[in-house]
Structure formats: structure tokens, C-alpha cells
Image (spheres, helix red, strand yellow):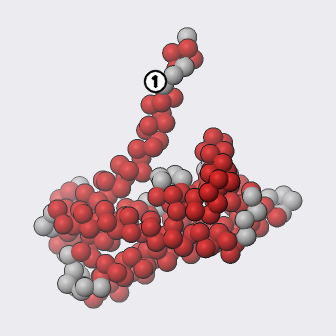
Amino acid sequence: MIQEIQQLMRELPTESTQQAVGYPTLFTLVALGSLVPVVPTGALVSSAAVVAFHQTSPLSLLFVFLVASGAAFLGDICLYWLGQRGVRSKNGSKWLSAITRRAAPERLAQAQEKLTDHGGTVLVLSRLIPAGRIPVMLACLLSRMPLRQFARGDVPACLAWAATYQLIGILGGSLFPEPWQGVVAAIALTLLISGAPAVWRRLRARFGPGADGATR
């Protein structure tokens, strides 16, 4: 697998071609991943940052940041607007149902509490915490937060998110001489960060307080 990635990276086209194809592709995939959370958008941004770090253009990293944050914002706004339509409808909608299914009841309760205490600023943390975006978005929908207010809170959230995952990519690019090595490292690190909360919750459920009594 690593040899295939190495060979692919060595056969990449020129920088101008990479940028002409890469930026629109990054924008499309990040926007799609924000709208339908099946694409590992953090890994995409980190990988793009690794490639940009090894390019000669001094603006490559800036373009990755702007494209990623803009695409994330667009995806969030579209998903929130679709969710609002479901909240207003008597029968709901498939988008609202999809958002609700992805938010565990306990995570939703925590998000609603934080939203009450901190208001729209909780959106920034929700973007940085793995699997935290959907529960907070659902809490905003259920509280009938206007789209304009959600957008104001989502702008710094998307900027902070894009900057965080770009820094991971820059770190991977600076540690390894070959771009493919940095891409592998960045993807591994982002997947580790994304999966850590789920693993922690499973460990707590299995070995935490009351686990022994529950299994007897």
C-alpha cells in the first residue's frame, strides 16, 4: 500500500495542473463531506496541506486554507438550512432525520446545555471536537436559532477547523522529505484523532464505573 502511494505521488503532474484540479476537487469533497458526513474531510485538508507545503508557490497553503474553510462553511449552511425546513415541517424531513440519527441522546443533551451556557461560541468547539459538529447543529436547530445567527458562529468555527487540520498537514510535510510520506502521516494522525473519542467511550462503557455490576 505504501509503495503504491509513493509511486502515485512521484507520478503527479506539474504544480499548475495539481492546483487547477486539486483546489476544485478539495472544495467539492469538503463541502460534500460537511453536508453528508461520510468523507473524512479533516484528512483531505491535511493531505492537501502536505502537498501545498512541498510546492514552490508561497500562496499554496493560503489557497488550501481558504478553499477548505469556504467549503466547510458552505456545507454547514446548506445542511442547517435543510434541517430548518424539517423543523418547520409537521412531518419533518429526511435531512432532519439524518441529523438526528447521527446525534446520540447524551451528546445532544450535552450540546443543548453548552449552547444554553455559551451561545453560538460553542460552534467553534463543535468543529474542533471529533463527532461534535452534528449534536451542536441539532441543538441549534431545536432551539430555533436563525440561520444568520448560526452563520455568524460558524464562520470562526470553519476557520479554526481548517487551520487546525492544515497545521497537522504542515507538521507532516515538515517531518518527511517526500510528500507521500507526509500524506500518510497526516492521514494516520487525523484518523487517530477522529477515532479516539469513540474508542474512549467504548472503553468507559466496558471498564468504567458500574461496568462490573452491569455484567453480573
Seen at 32% across and 71% down, the residue is 48
x then y, percent, for residue 206: 48, 25
Query: Which residue is under mark 1?
Result: 207
> Which quadrant of the figure has residue 171?
bottom left
Residue 138 visible in image:
no
Q: Position of residue 200 (x, y in %)?
A: 44, 37
**Could you tell me which residue is drawn at 72 percent across and 65 percent down?**
145
Relative to 114, is 4 above or below? below
- Seen as rendered, the residue at the extreme top is 216
Nearest the eye: 148 or 73: 148
Note whether 192 is above or below 96 in the view shown: above
Secondary element at tag 1: helix
Between 5 and 215, the one lying in front of the other is: 215
Mark 1 Cα-neighbour bin, 10 Å: few <14, some 14–19, many ≥20: few
Labels in figure, total: 1
Where is residue 141? Give x, y as percent. Answer: 71, 60
Q: Is residue 69 visible?
A: yes
Mark 1 belongs to which amino acid? Phe
* Residue at the spot 37% in from the left edge and 77% down from the top edge: 64
Residue shown at the point (41%, 62%) measured from the top left? 42
* Image quadrant in which the N terminus is located: bottom left
